[in-house]
Image (tube, rainbow, N blue to C red):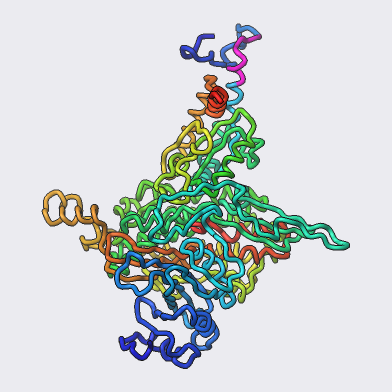
Amino acid sequence: MSAVDVETRTPAAEKLHEKLAGSSVAGKVSVHDLDLPTIEAGPADWPALARFLRDDPGCRFDLFLDLAGVDNLKRKGSKTRFEAVAHLHSLSNNQHIRVRVPLPDAEKPSLPSVESVWPAANWYEREAYDLFGFDFPGHPNLYRLLCHDAFVGHALRKDYAPGQRWFYTESDLRVPDWAQHTEERAGHFETQTLSIGPSHPATHGIIHLLARLDGERIVRSETIIGYLHRCFEKMAEKHHWNQVIPYADRLNYVSAMVNGVGYVRTVEKMLGIEVPERGQLVRTILSEFTRIVDHAVCVGANLVDIGALTAFIYLYQPRENFYSLIEACCGARLTVSYVRVGGLAIDVPEDFVPRCRGLLESIPKFLDDVEKLVDKNRIVRNRLQGTGVVTKEQAIAWGLTGPMLRASGVPYDVRRARPYDFYDRFDWDVAVANDGDNFSRYLVRMEEIRQSLKIIRQALDIFPEKGPVNSDDWHVVLPPKDAVYHDMESLIYHFKLVMEGIRVPPGERYEWIEGVNGELGFYAVSDGRGGPYRLKVRPPCFPSMAAFEKIILGGTVSDMIATLGTLNVIAGELDR
Amino acid sequence: MALRKRGKLPAFDPGATGGAGGADFLTTKLEAMVGWARKNSLWPFPFATACCGIEFMSVAAAHYDISRFGSEVIRFSPRQADLLIVAGTVTDKMAPILRRIYDEMPEPKWVISMGVCASSGGFYRAYHVTQGIDEIVPVDVYVPGCPPTPEQLIHAVIQLQQRIASGEKSRDSRSRRFAAEQPG
């Protein structure tokens, strides 16, 4: 296949091509140059390729980011009905790649599991099994992940009706074998199984945890998720590109703005349009404020879980102040739907800059108060220090990103590794801690709040007083109302956009930004219609939650509660 | 004591009797007094599943402060709560748990459905989302919004309080009576 592949490649793809030529899969895989270097491999070659990509000193794709299934039933020009698409990142080379595995068997799509290469793949493969019916021979625990256990069929296949529901009762829940009976060991206490959640005050959203306890120590555990599976990806396929924005906002409802920006950037890159400087800066400023709010909620809620209510009340006040600001911008507090493809829904209010500066003045005081209460507090230190430890190697193997990864000593931040918008122009630091425990994650989050304040301050300094916030490409952005009323051409643009949606050229794209919990990626496939053909989100807290059942092993139940708080799992994003 | 509304129980107002020149006793109907006591001590169980749960946290925090309306004693055990606030999307996987929690609450009990997802499924007209919690539990007050503003939720609590004070039965007891009257 590689011999007939004569397209011109970018240096990155060319280098990858040369590397693969010396590997055991040489001649069986081909390298294409799309938005990312894309390797195409058959299912049989996938494990060997995976091992090579991870271990070869020139490649070192150690971070498994995402696995998306695609059903090509209604897409023209594809050879196979199903394909699996994986995205990988190399920390040492700072490079993303895509691996596409077309699955020739449409009846029983199957590809070998790579869970032994990247442990992070475990849940992604379960998800693909659940939603597409892909079989993964070699997978240790291949059961449904998101849909309930009485579900019939595979929901993201194109021939599955979006509204088809199935009756489910509590007795249908699949309880793993090990949790159904206790073990008795000679001269030892009987172990017991504890079921925590899904409706539990300490689970932060609806997560179900089964833990086997030996005395007070957790010796085995399994997390059951999917209690908030709201079918984001299926809904996205049924809507126009712009209509997906409210759905995207509700993925991580604590940081709606960041999700919206991540999604529309993907569409904008596919269209090849640019947002004016003012629009980009508004996005940056509000995204960073959102990051502050998210970290404040995460730290506050975590402290509540370990018994410190005061800090929570302190951290909630700047949040209310920020909500007033964003309410002034777009009318909504939480799920803002403020961005649009090509810009923003409306311009910011006149007093935007002074209000932001006012917030910048007020927030550090709350942080100081919290740090005074927490940093040297012996109870907090005892609860957080040395608990929930994730080593550097584990963090990478489990596919963690964001504050989780940085607290384990890996300085990977998308804003620095691949600067978007204006992040390369600002002077700021990546917050890193080395211990990998709960306290490190607390420290990283608090430092990131301060760095975000620094970024906002610099963004406000270069914020243009006047200027457009939207692109002037009327194929994408609604023309101004005045023009629609008085100009035939604008009226037509308006009509076409509202009725048919934005026409995105056929193709695919993976775009990623630094979400509040880590790398937030959107993999979009367009077939030229007004809406996405397939939209896969890489939710940053998904790998953290997958790793949770391993992190808490050996700890006590109270450590587990403290650890869950620092993971910052948002159920909307986890379950989609 | 004057009737507040035709057909409704007389309002119970301890301040109206007693005091200077007043009698040292009061007369009222027991239901009215019980209703007065109940309405000012609604203990909510926040069944917070999604975005609305975050907004519920705002209602409970210092700025909006639901304790001004006697509902700040948030209970995470259904056995100690009499008001179930369903805040957020309920999926088919979660629905049996919602019903179980509702059944575990002692009577009398009331349900507020916060947000459009809980009320009708919202814009998630999809394969895994319950299209309104009234498929599973009887609802007393629906709050629209995605998510509702904190003021809207407070308004819902006040509305519920008015209904409790007027002696109106909860949807729960009405649906039980209806079920008992059905032949066969």
First to last magenta residue range: B25-34
Q: Quadrant of residue A268?
A: bottom left
In the picture provided, is A245 more to the left or to the right than B155?
Answer: left
Count the marks: how many? 0
The residue shown at (45%, 39%) is: B119
Q: Position of residue A133 (x, y in %)?
A: 48, 64
Is A467 drawn above or below residue B23 in the view shown?
below
Q: Quadrant of residue A241?
A: bottom left
Q: Position of residue A118 (x, y in %)?
A: 56, 75
Is A100 drawn above or below residue A68 in the view shown?
below
In this view, the residue in front, A207 or A41, is A41
The residue shown at (65%, 59%) is: A176
Could you tell me if residue A480 is visible in this image? yes
The residue shown at (37%, 60%) is: A283
The residue shown at (78%, 60%) is: A183
Quadrant of the frame with the N terminus of chain A: bottom left
Q: Quadrant of residue A550?
A: bottom right
